[in-house]
Amino acid sequence: MGLVSLLQRQVESRAETICRFRNQNLPAELGKASFEPITNGVVFFKQHYLLDSAHCDYTSQVAKIEWDDSVNSWCLFVADEQDDEIWLPYPYLPQSNDLTALMRELDKDPKSLFWDD
């Protein structure tokens, strides 16, 4: 069963907030955050810019937050370093019933697995 639209909107709203605050505090050369909704969650991207460029050079997937019906919780994934189409469970907090906890972990990135190159 799909995620209730209210919960989908909640995860999208929090993703939008994370990206907006991250982008306010960083120059484009360090990469801009963005996200796209997916079924039952969102995928986060880092847009990479060339020095002194206003146009995105390329985009890479960095994280995914997705509701898993089988365990009734939110799951946080990090993109594989070699292939960003492969998702690995985030080793420090792979799942939680608390969406805020996962969003906070993604936003703060204490282990530098999401936003650092």
Image: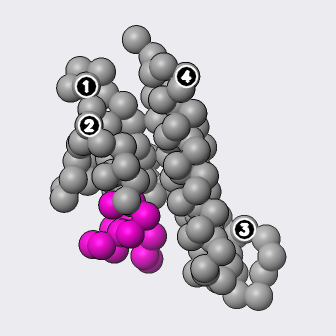
| Badge 2 element | loop
User: Mark 4 to mark 1: distance in Å?
Assistant: 16 Å
**Residue 110 among those drawn in magenta:** yes
Which label's residue is closer to the chain start, 2 or 1? 1
- Name the residue that disc number 4 marks: 5
Residue 13, relative to residue 50: is it above or below? above
User: Mark 2 to mark 1: distance in Å?
Assistant: 7 Å
Q: Are marks 3 and 1 in contact (CB under 8 Å)?
A: no
Mark in front: 3 vs 2: 2
- Name the residue that disc number 3 marks: 56
| Badge 1 element | loop
Q: Which residues are magenta?
A: 105-117
Mark in front: 3 vs 4: 4
- Name the residue that disc number 2 marks: 97
Q: Position of residue 86 (x, y in %)?
A: 36, 46
Q: Quadrant of residue 2?
A: top left
Is 88 left or right of 82, judged from the image as shown? left
- Name the residue that disc number 1 marks: 72
Give, as a three-letter code, the residue at label 3.
Answer: Cys
Of 50 and 33, the residue lying toward us: 33
Give, as a three-letter code, the residue at label 4.
Answer: Ser
Which label's residue is closer to the chain start, 4 or 1? 4
Give, as a three-letter code, the residue at label 1.
Answer: Asn
User: Mark 4 to mark 2: distance in Å?
Assistant: 17 Å
State the residue lying farthest toward the bottom. Answer: 52
Q: Are marks 2 and 1 in contact (CB under 8 Å)?
A: yes
| Badge 3 element | strand
Residue 102, relative to residue 81: is it above or below? above
